[in-house]
């Protein structure tokens, strides 16, 4: 979520950056200016009426205690002049009260005014709260603003290739797509998966299942032992507050699997005990610190998590109907960082390099793409996509999306950090700490395990139909170097 104060002070810039995203500012910002102006005025009116009421009540109390019949008009008039008058009727009331002829304002009139100001103040406060709610609802649908160095473009065709790594393999036989390789070897079965669960699921057998586990273990070991991440095993089911915090709700509810054990989802309502299957470990891991304040000395915090992910793939009818590219359930190793704002660009680059290292260790050719404004995700300020080469299909496909969300998610999830004053170390007293501010969040796949699996099948396929195992995975495959044909419950091992 964007900062209201920033939007108010920089509305032309916000509108410009939204247009760069291909978003019509009028469609998402609506009556922002009017709502924000009315909300702030209502808050000021409520505060002013509360102040006048309190002053009148204090004067009433003193007069009552002293046995006086009223209060001195010379004291009364300046108090009334502080009122912010909203209506013509209010102006008439104020004028009549100020221009009264009597030097003493009777207690009966004072008591009536105290009640009136109390009711009017509460009404203005209610109006401000309603406008604030409406404004928050409006801001929920406003996407993050692109980072200054994100190229302007309409769609994926205008993304910028930043680097290419590795040599594409060449074969003296026709390269096959992974679904044909896996089905011929008997390690992938889409037909039985459809029988069990419907379309967009897969069953893996034997060395195929072992390869998936080997890839996940390799990724986790690399990130925890060499890259400094702490492994987390989060819940695979989250509540709607968590999905709101990371930006999936309310905009992308149709892309998620909702459990109806607590009733249907009501747009705009975010609970603690409703249940959704996670679309990515980004959701539970980011929300570990929801409504918390971290100390600056703790940052950066780097987590990695291996979880299944569940997506409805709404709107993808007819796309990638074969193979493992677009599944309702898949496994992924996710990288999540919580960082200081001034460090987020460097940490984003570092996290992206960590994801690239997985591909390089596996010997899988890839390219890094800087997404243009029109292709970025709703919550992202800047995104690098890593695309792996798939020779069986003759194209690059996304295998990791590494994004810097800046303070967008942290503001929605209320994740802050407390910076220490300059010159004070971690041992400084809490009393000297600065006001807590929103930190920045960064995450990316390190990697999507299923897509890495299919990339291995296609890049390491051999003429006899077997698949060579990348050298770095051999220890995780119990010394096996080739994935051979799996027949029934037994595997025919070749080339060990």
Image: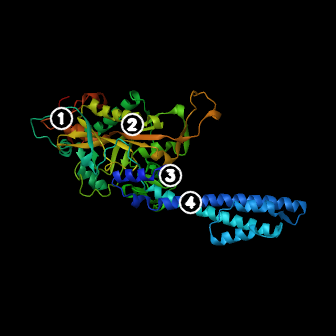
- Position above or below: 23 against 91: above
Q: Earlier in the sequence, mark 1 or mark 2?
A: 1
Left/right of residue 219 with respect to residue 37 in the rendered view: left
Q: Secondary structure at mark 1?
A: loop
Q: Which residue is mark 3?
A: 4
Q: Secondary structure at mark 3?
A: helix
Residues at marks 2 and 3 touching, judged by CB atoms closer than 8 Å: no
Left/right of residue 179 with respect to residue 247 in the rendered view: left
Q: Which residue is mark 1?
A: 168
Q: Which residue is mark 4?
A: 39
Left/right of residue 367 with respect to residue 297 in the rendered view: left
Q: Earlier in the sequence, mark 1 or mark 3?
A: 3
Please provide percent x and percent y for residue 277: 41, 51
Please provide percent x and percent y for residue 240: 47, 54
Residues at marks 1 and 3 touching, judged by CB atoms closer than 8 Å: no
* Residue plotted at (39% across, 36% down): 348
Label 1 environment density (alpha carbons within 10 Å; few <14, some 14–19, many ≥20): some
Label 2 environment density (alpha carbons within 10 Å; few <14, some 14–19, many ≥20): many
Q: Secondary structure at mark 4?
A: helix
Q: Nearer the viewer, mark 1 or mark 2?
A: 2
Foreground residue among 105 and 411: 105
Please provide percent x and percent y for residue 148: 37, 42
* Residue plotted at (89% across, 64% down): 68
Q: Earlier in the sequence, mark 3 or mark 4?
A: 3
């Amino acid at each position: 979520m964007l900062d209201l104060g920033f939007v108010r002070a920089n509305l032309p810039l916000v509108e410009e950056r939204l247009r760069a995203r291909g978003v019509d500012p009028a469609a998402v910002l609506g009556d922002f200016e009017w709502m924000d102006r009315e909300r702030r005025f209502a808050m000021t009116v409520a505060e002013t009426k509360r102040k006048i009421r309190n002053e009148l009540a204090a004067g009433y109390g003193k007069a009552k205690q002293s046995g006086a019949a009223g209060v001195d008009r010379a004291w009364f008039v300046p108090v009334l002049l502080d009122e912010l008058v909203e209506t013509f009727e209010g102006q008439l009331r104020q004028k009549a009260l100020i221009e009264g002829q009597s030097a003493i304002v009777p207690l009966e009139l004072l008591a009536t005014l105290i009640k009136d100001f109390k009711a009017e103040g509460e009404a203005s406060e209610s109006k401000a709260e309603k406008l604030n709610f409406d404004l928050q609802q409006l801001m929920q649908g406003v996407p993050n603003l692109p980072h200054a160095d994100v190229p302007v473009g309409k769609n994926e065709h205008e993304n910028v290739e930043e680097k290419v790594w590795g040599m594409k393999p060449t074969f003296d036989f026709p390269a096959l797509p992974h679904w044909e390789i896996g089905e011929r070897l008997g390690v992938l079965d889409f037909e039985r998966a459809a029988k069990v669960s419907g379309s967009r699921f897969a069953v893996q057998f034997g060395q195929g299942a072992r390869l998936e586990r080997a890839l996940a273990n390799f990724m986790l070991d690399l990130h925890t032992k060499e890259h400094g991440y702490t492994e987390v095993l989060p819940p695979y089911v989250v509540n709607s507050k968590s999905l709101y915090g990371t930006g999936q709700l309310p905009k992308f509810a149709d892309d998620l699997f909702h459990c109806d054990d607590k009733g249907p989802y009501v747009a705009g309502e975010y609970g603690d005990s409703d249940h959704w299957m996670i679309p990515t470990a980004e959701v539970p891991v980011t929300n570990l610190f929801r409504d918390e304040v971290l100390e600056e000395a703790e940052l950066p915090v780097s987590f990695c998590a291996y979880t299944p992910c569940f997506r409805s793939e709404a709107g993808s009818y007819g796309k990638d109907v074969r193979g493992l590219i677009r599944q309702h359930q898949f496994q992924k190793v996710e990288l999540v960082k919580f960082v200081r704002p001034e460090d987020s660009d460097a940490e984003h680059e570092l996290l992206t390099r960590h994801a690239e290292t997985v591909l390089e260790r596996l010997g899988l050719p890839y390219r890094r793409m800087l997404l243009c404004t029109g292709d970025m995700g709703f919550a992202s300020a800047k995104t690098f996509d890593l695309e792996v080469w798939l020779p069986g299909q003759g194209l690059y496909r996304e295998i990791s999306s590494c994004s810097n969300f800046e303070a967008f998610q942290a503001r929605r999830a209320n994740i802050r950090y407390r910076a220490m004053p300059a010159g004070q170390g971690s041992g400084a007293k809490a009393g000297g700490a600065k006001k807590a501010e929103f930190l920045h969040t960064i995450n990316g796949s390190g990697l999507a395990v299923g897509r890495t699996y299919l990339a291995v099948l296609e890049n390491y396929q051999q003429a006899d139909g077997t698949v060579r195992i990348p050298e770095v995975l051999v220890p995780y495959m119990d010394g096996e170097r080739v994935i051979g044909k799996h027949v029934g419950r037994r595997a025919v091992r070749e080339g060990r």
